[in-house]
Image (cartoon, coloured by chain):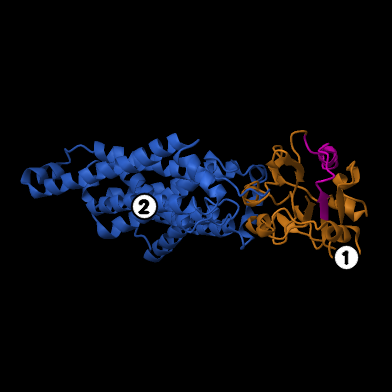
């Protein structure tokens, strides 16, 4: 494994950060009153991206020892990593500006936010392109992988934002019910994408088949079935569905509306769901890197 | 300008590792780091079996994948077709190691720089042969200009019908007789 846990964490944090930024932009328009959720998304976004970049720097040993070399990262436009460096730089600047304005309680310039949205999407999809263009590893070299990473980025972004918001103020979680619906659909799409990717990729060649079988039934099968499928996808899909059904019931009765308004309901479901989505998001990145089998050249 | 390449006759290779040791000495590598890796493969069913020892190092690809993915342009190709790493530019991101179809790259754990076979550019500039070629006990390795039809290597490639390891993975400059 040339790229291990540190890079998996970086890919996860970059997606999470971009997803949190997009979530907060959506919330700010759809639910102008959900201030806590919006602020949370805007604050965690640049912080998580920053942590991700620090991990990346630590992993790039030669650069860590000679930091000025990182400037060269902007030079090779044939490299997806160079393109990604630009995306992340612009995204970081926009995310940092938006967080700063939020902190100073000033209005966010909407054009800077739009630029942030564009580069947030760019950052999320870049994490998939980065490994997707590696022809040597058939598991990665598929068109569906970047899409899977974007869907997972959005899903972890929502999870991270709601988790932190829920801890800060538990009333807010039920203010943003459409986000929960989007979240549920993203998780369902993720299951579909993983299934499609594995089914198609495993038939493309021997190395790919080896990768897929190491995940489904081999070396990584425990992590795959328990951490990714059961905890990361199945559990949140079930709880989120129950929550949505429950929420509908609550909004139909007076007692329910009072409970929701008072914020006296439990948010345990939300905390469990969002935490398990985050576990699943990291596990997905880790497994995709770990199960990489290069084409046999002999 | 030349286009340097190598031919390795695996039928002559006895697997003595002399090339690897001389490479390590020439490039001042630690004992556990080497630019040449040995692969042994058995083919066929008894009694018709064949055992091959295949030394693999950087294949000096044309349009090298490691060069195009390198974000800092630390990996580059010289005018003579030799793929090199500028240790002053490498940040150690290991993208090239991931992209190399031959897993021919290793990371120097002291500096963090990613390294690989350099076709002994310094020796070649002095008109000498790369260390692995001059040390080979069975003359399994031939080095020279692929663009010169009269060079020893060009003639040998035609004579023995030498081929790259995997033509479908892109054009390379190391040819194998198997």
Quadrant in the rendering for residue A164 = top left
Q: Position of residue A181 (x, y in %)?
A: 25, 52
Disc number for residue A274: none
- Which residue is drawn at the image coordinates 32% and 42% (left, top)? A234
Chain in blue in the render: A
Give the camera-side residue of A265 and B104.
B104
Q: Which segment is the magenta one?
A: B6-30
Q: Chain of mark 2?
A: A
- Which residue is drawn at the image coordinates 82% and 46% (left, top)? B11
**Helix, strand or loop at mark 1:** loop
Give the camera-side residue of A252 and B80.
B80
The residue carrying mark 2 is: A192
Instruction: Decide if residue B116 is in sight here.
Output: yes
**Helix, strand or loop at mark 2:** helix
Q: Position of residue B39 (x, y in %)?
A: 72, 41
Quadrant in the rendering for residue A292 = top right
Give the camera-side residue of A23 and A129.
A129
Give the camera-side residue of B111 and A32.
B111
The residue carrying mark 1 is: B148
Q: Position of residue A163 (x, y in %)?
A: 32, 42
Q: Chain of mark 1?
A: B
């Amino acid at each position: 494994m040339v790229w291990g846990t540190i890079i998996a964490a970086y890919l996860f944090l970059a997606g999470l950060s971009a997803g949190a930024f997009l979530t907060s932009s959506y919330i700010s328009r759809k639910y102008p009153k959900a201030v806590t959720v919006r602020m949370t998304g805007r604050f965690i976004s640049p912080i998580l991206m920053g942590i991700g970049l620090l991990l990346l720097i630590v992993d790039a040993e030669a650069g860590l020892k000679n930091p000025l070399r990182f400037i060269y990262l902007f030079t090779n436009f044939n490299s997806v990593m160079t393109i990604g460096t630009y995306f992340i730089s612009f995204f970081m600047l926009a995310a940092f500006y938006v967080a700063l304005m939020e902190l100073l309680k000033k209005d966010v310039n909407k054009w800077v936010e739009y630029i942030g949205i564009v580069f947030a999407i760019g950052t999320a999809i870049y994490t998939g392109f980065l490994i997707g263009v590696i022809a040597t590893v058939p598991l990665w070299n598929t068109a569906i992988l970047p899409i899977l990473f974007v869907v997972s980025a959005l899903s972890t972004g929502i999870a991270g934002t709601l988790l932190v918001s829920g801890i800060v103020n538990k009333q807010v979680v039920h203010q943003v019910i459409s986000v929960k619906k989007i979240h549920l659909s993203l998780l369902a799409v993720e299951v579909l994408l993983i299934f499609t990717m594995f089914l198609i990729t495993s038939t493309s060649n021997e190395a790919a088949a080896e990768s897929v079988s190491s995940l489904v039934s081999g070396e990584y099968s425990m992590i795959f079935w328990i951490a990714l499928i059961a905890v990361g996808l199945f559990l949140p899909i079930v709880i989120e569905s129950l929550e949505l059904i429950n929420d509908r019931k609550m909004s139909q009765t007076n007692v329910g509306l009072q409970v929701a308004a008072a914020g006296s309901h439990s948010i345990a479901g939300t905390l469990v769901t969002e935490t398990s989505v985050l576990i699943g998001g990291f596990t997905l990145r880790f497994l995709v890197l770990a199960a990489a089998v290069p084409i046999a050249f002999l | 300008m030349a286009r340097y390449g190598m031919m390795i006759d695996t039928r002559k290779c006895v697997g003595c590792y002399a090339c690897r040791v001389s490479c390590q000495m020439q490039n001042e590598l630690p004992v556990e780091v080497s630019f040449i890796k040995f692969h042994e493969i058995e083919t066929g069913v008894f009694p018709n079996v064949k055992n091959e020892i295949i030394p693999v190092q950087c294949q000096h690809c044309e349009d090298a994948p490691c060069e195009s993915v390198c974000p800092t342009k630390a990996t580059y190709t010289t005018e003579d077709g030799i793929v090199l790493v500028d240790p002053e530019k490498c940040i150690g991101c290991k993208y090239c190691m991931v992209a190399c179809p031959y897993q021919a790259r290793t990371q120097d754990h002291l500096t963090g720089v990613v390294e690989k076979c350099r076709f002994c550019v310094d020796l070649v500039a002095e008109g000498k042969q790369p260390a692995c070629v001059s040390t080979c006990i069975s003359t399994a390795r031939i080095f020279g200009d692929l663009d010169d039809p009269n060079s020893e290597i060009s003639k040998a490639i035609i004579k023995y019908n030498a081929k790259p390891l995997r033509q479908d993975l892109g054009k390379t400059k190391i040819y194998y007789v198997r």
